[in-house]
Each structure stands twice: as C-alpha cells, then as structure tokens.
Amino acid sequence: MIEIKNLKKVYNGVTVVNVPHLQINKGESIGLVGNNGAGKTTLFRMILDLIRCDSGEVLSNGVNVAGGEAWKNYTASYLDEGFLIDYLTPEEYFYFIGGLHQQNKAQVDEKLAGISEFFNGEIINKGKYIRDLSKGNQCKVGVGACLLQQPELLMLDEPFANIDPSTQFRLKNILKDQNKNHGVTTIVSSHDLNHVTDVCERILLMEKGVVIKDIATGSSTLSELEEYFGVGQSNAAYVVDKEENH
Amino acid sequence: MTDLSSSHMISTFFDHELKAFWRSKNTGKSIAVKVVMGILIFILFLYVLALGLFMDKIVHAMSPNEDLTVAFCGIVLVYFLGDLLMRLQLQELPTLKVQPYLHLPVKRNSVVGYLALTALLSFFNLWPIIIFGPFILKIILPASGAVTTIVFIVSIIALSIFNNYLALYIKRKANLNGWIFLMAGAFLTLITCGDYVWHLYSLKAISYLFFGNLIIKPYLVLLPLVLSVAMYYVNFYYLKGNLYLEELSSKKDVIRKSSTEIPFLNRFGNIGDLVANEVKLILRNKRPRSALIMGLFFMFYGLIFYTNPKIGEGFKVFVGMFMTGIFIINYGQFMFSWQAGHFDGLLVSKIKFTDFLKAKYLLFTIVSTVAFILTTPYVYFGWRTVLIHFIMYLWNLGINTTIVLYFANRNYKRIDLSKGASFNWEGVGASQLLLSFPLILFPYVIYLPFKYLGYTNVGLAVLAIIGVAFIITRDFWIKKLEADFYTKRFKIAEGFRNK
C-alpha cells in the first residue's frame, strides 16, 4: 500500500524524519508512537504530500504521492482541525466531502446514520458551525468525514487526544471494524499506549525522526513500550505499573 | 506575584504587549511592507495634520459670514458625534489578550486597569488633538488668552476620552446582545436626523452653547471632565464585573445556524460545490463579508466622477474597471489566504486543482456579472458609459482574474477569518502591493496610446478583444496557473500553517 524509500526531512539542519525504508502492506493496522518531536506528524504530512521531502519518496500503490492525485481517491485522513472547513455546519461539510466522492445527499445521510453512535447526538443538526464545536467534537467530524469516503487507507493523527472515554472506546471499535471487516489499511498515531496496542497489529516506534522499533503487537508489546517510554523511572515504580496492568 | 504593585503589573502587561506585536508573524518579516505601511500611515497623518493646521481657513471658507470662533465652537460637538460613529465601527476592543492572565495570581484591578488604559492607545484619541489643537493655538489663544486655551484643550481631550470609553462600553454590551449595537446606531442616526433632516434643533447651536460659554465661564470645563471620568469608571466596573472569557470574547453567536443551499450552483457539479463553500466563507465571516460590502459601496464610485463634467472618458475605463471588478481586486488580492485555515484539508481531499481554479473563475464571473448589472443605471450618463463598463467587465473576467490568481500563488500569508476587517493588516504582504500595479496600469498601457493618437474607439475595441481573447483561452491559463501552483504549493501550505 505504502512504500517509503530514503525519506528525509531536515529543518534548520536538524533531521526530523529519516526513514530509509518502510513497507506498509494492504490491510495492515499500523500504530505510530513516539514522544513529542519524534516526527510522527511530519511523516504523516509527507505521506499526504503536504510538505516537501528533502530526499526520497513515498509510493502509494506504487505511485509517488508527490504531485500525484490518484492517491486522494482512496486515502482519507484527519490530522488536525486545519483539515476542516470551519465555517460550514457539519452536515454541509459532510455533503461537500461526499459530493467529492460522487455521493448524493441520501447516500451521505445513510452513511452518517451508520456512525450516529460515534457522533453521540452531538454533531448532526446541532445548528452550529464546525468552528463553534469543541475540539473533541471537531475530531468526530474529521473522523466521520474520513469514514464517509470509504477509504482504502485511513490516517489519523492522535485521534484519541481530545475525545471522551466513550468516544475513544467507540473509535477503537470503528478502527478495528474498518480494518478487519472492510480491509482498510489504518495508520494511527497516539500517545496512549493502551489504545494503540489494542487497535494496531503493528507498532512503529519513532525517535528523533527514525523508526527505531517495528514490532508486531503481541502480549509483551505494551510492557516493551512502557519500558521504552518509562525512561528515568525507578524500577520499583515500573514493577507497580506492571501489576496494575494485570 | 500578588504583592506586586498594580502599576508594576501593568508595565509587565505593556512589555508583553510590545513583544506580542514585534514577534507576531504578521508584523511582517518583510521590511518593504513595513516601510510602505509606515509611509501610508505617515501620509494619512500628514493629511490630518494639514486639516488641523488649515482649520481656520477651512472654517472661514465654509461659513464666511460667521465669526471664526463662533463657527469653530459650532463644529466641535458635531465632530465628536461623527467620531463616536467612526469609533463604533472601527475601534477594536482590547480584550482577548488578557486570557492568559486570568487564571494567574494577578489582581483583577491590574487586569482591568490595563484593559482600560490600553484602550486609550488608539489613533482615534490622537485625531481630535491634531485636528483642533492648531486652531485653538492659532485663533483662540491670541483672542481669548491662556486660560481659555487650556480649558478648550482639556475639554477636547476629555470629550475624546469620553467618546473612547462610551464607544467601548457600547461595543462590549453589544457583544452580549447584538441589538444594542443597532439601537446605538439608530439613536445616533435619530440625533443626526433631528438636526439635518427634521430641523428640530441645531447641533451647532448646542455645541456653541457649551463652547461659547466656556470662553466666558472657564469652570464649565468640569462638565466634560466629569463625564469622561464617569465614563471611565462605568467601563472599569463593568469590565471588572464581567471578567469572564465568554463575555470578553467577541463571539456573539447564539442564533441557531442552519445549513443553506444555493441551488443555482448545483448544475456546476464539483466546481459549483466549491463556489458554494466560498460563498458561505464570504457570508459567514466578518472580514470577507466586509470586502463584499465595500464592493457594494464602490457601485457609487461612478457618481463621484461622472457628475463632474471636467473628467474625460479615459477615466471611465478606470472607474468601470473598479466598479465591475472591485470584488476581484478586493477579495481576490487575498487569495488563497481566506482558505488558509483549511488549506491542508483541501490539499488532501479529492479536489483537482484545476477545479479549484475554475471555481475561483466562476465565483469572480458571478460576482462581476452582478456588479455589471448593478452599474447599468449609469446609462443615465449615456449608453457609451455602459459600453465602457461592459468592455471593462470583459477585461476583468479575462485579465484581472488571471492576474489575481497568478499573485495568489505567491501569497503565503495566513488570514484568521474570525477577526474583523478594520485596521487588520493580517495577510497583507508584498504580493498585494505588487498586484496593484498591473491591475491599474495594464488597461492604460493599451488604451492611452490609442487615445492620444485619436483612435479612442480602437483603443476600447482592443481592450475588449484582449479581454475576450483571455476568456476564450482560459483553459490554457488555468493549466499555466496549475503548473505554477505545483511548484509553490508546499510553501503556500507551510505559510498558511503558521499562525
């Protein structure tokens, strides 16, 4: 699905992304983790052709994304509120996005009805512009718009960050369902290790722009990640953590 | 922090404010823009200063039979009435910036005091002094002496402070309830109409009643002083009692928002959808909306020039271009900045840039057509006038749209749609300044040589032909613009991400 070759991005002499090679296959569910500044969002943006890479390329279905249009047909993404047209009502936005994919209003309404549980009655027919919604509800609009497009590749940047626990739970189910039952390749970044190990079968751990770990999720993955992120913590505290998780 | 004195805190606020100004991304990395802006402000300042310095001559010319001082005294209050109206429309509330301090151990009095004080740092408070100061020194001082001069100056400063706080108070109230603004506007209109339309009273007489008596009874200066101090405290206590974010912010959206459709645009498919979005962008956001409303005012542009018989036909080319194309110029100069907030979203969604550009052309065509239709009453000045308007309408659709979009590819400045239009320099960069040259010069470069050779009609015909030629070859220009965009899109998107 996605193949990255020698991808590099340098800002002011600092390499923020450096991925010599990465292959993401169709139907995989990828979790991207790493501390702030690890290069997750930059990598996302390069896959979406939003920033110029200094060297290398990103191939989507074998075609370079840079300057291409074909990948937009099957790729849906939500990185931040900058992806939403904030002076529209959510319905207007959904109809617009649906229209881009040749869906009429009835089709859009039908699809939205399918995710009404995720919206939890806070999005549709609320009489608000997107800009007046809370960050969590904006995130729901962004994710909703992605699902509407029935993508083959779904990319979400920290989708769990602003949404309430019930919505987090629902989003995890949606992601699993999309991946398992619809064959959608998902790439999700998160700081919540529990969520990401729950949803994703393959975890990429980034540090200073480099993918330092590429692991298939197993029973020990969570503790392995906690060990990495728990730098500086005393061993005792770590053990307590482990017990809590059992 | 709590034991810091209030004045110390206020100076810290000022320091932060200065840093915010200089470090703001919009303060402009480009020195050229700063210089030009500086010059423009300086020229405006010179105009006002000239108005002040020649006030005596102007007053004399306006009412040659009246005594200078009497006429002057009659003007002052009328000025302040207009001043209040201007402030209500243009003066910005110094508000939201306090947000980061509200949760800190900073005394409320410091925050409120800071807000109240910075409100004085407005150009509006400078104008009355520049306009009236010279006259008072030139005419009143020699005629009535030092005491009168001082009380005049103090009165004028006090009145402008009164106006300052009154305007802010009304605006703050209006933030909570939009009707208050309308009521204030209606009230001011009634006062004006009462004098100039219904002749119930004379504002000049009232103004003279006060300022005329001020010459004889200097202690009357206490009246404006008390008014201004009272208004300051009304503001101070109102702010102090309402120092909550939702009330400070400029949001007054309580009305239920409904989804709207523009059926006419449906027939254009995806391009129509894009135009519909942009129409909503314009109507639902302050700054683009005022760009559109400004455009409507430009429909009267012709009245200023055409009623003057001395102005020749060559000028109609210019006026016609502005009237039918003001939207292209006024709104188009900030393309694609209007969409900066969701530009990433546009880039990753399934929109072909060709369609994106075609949508811009369609939007320009619709608005310019409406503008052209609105200018048809100028047929009063002859069919030829309408013909010239039509030629310039074609020119706008052919050339100016393309020029504007060419410069849009070179515009990397973000615009925050939620902010108002007045004195908002956000998004203004070198590209807007450069843009104005070809827009204004090109039609003349073509028209004037013909005119001076005596072939005016040929000149007009050539303008029309070029306009039509560009409209016919539009697809070619769209391709060029698209290729150009692809070399610049990363820079544009990055610039738009910089808040």
Image (spheres, rainbow, N blue to C red):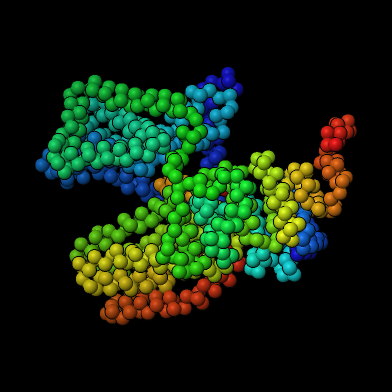
> Closest to the observer: B480 or B441?
B480
Q: Residue at x 83, y 37 (%)?
A: A245
Q: Note whether residue B491 is visible.
A: no
Question: In the rendering, at what x and y percent does residue B117 appear?
Answer: 44, 30
Q: B53 above or below A39?
A: above
Question: In the rendering, at what x and y percent does residue B352 appear?
Answer: 57, 68
Q: In the rendered image, which quarter contains the N terminus of chain B?
A: top right
Q: B220 above or below A115?
A: above
> Closest to the observer: B415 or B460?
B415
> Closest to the observer: B222 or B403?
B403
Q: Residue at x 54, y 74 (%)?
A: B479
Q: Note whether residue B246 is visible.
A: yes
Question: In the rendering, at what x and y percent does residue B38 appear?
Answer: 44, 49
Based on the displayed image, in which of its 4 quarters is residue B459 positioned? bottom left
* Left or right of residue B346: residue B139: left
> Closest to the observer: A5 or B83?
A5
- Which residue appears farthest toward the left when viewing the image? B65
* Left or right of residue A95: residue B391: left
Q: B320 above or below B118?
A: below
Q: Residue at x 58, y 18 (%)?
A: B3
Q: Residue at x 75, y 45 (%)?
A: A195
How many marks on residues?
0
Question: In the rendering, at what x and y percent does residue A197 appear?
Answer: 79, 47
Based on the displayed image, in which of its 4 quarters is residue B397 positioned? bottom left
Based on the displayed image, in which of its 4 quarters is residue B187 positioned? top left
Q: B96 above or below A33?
A: above
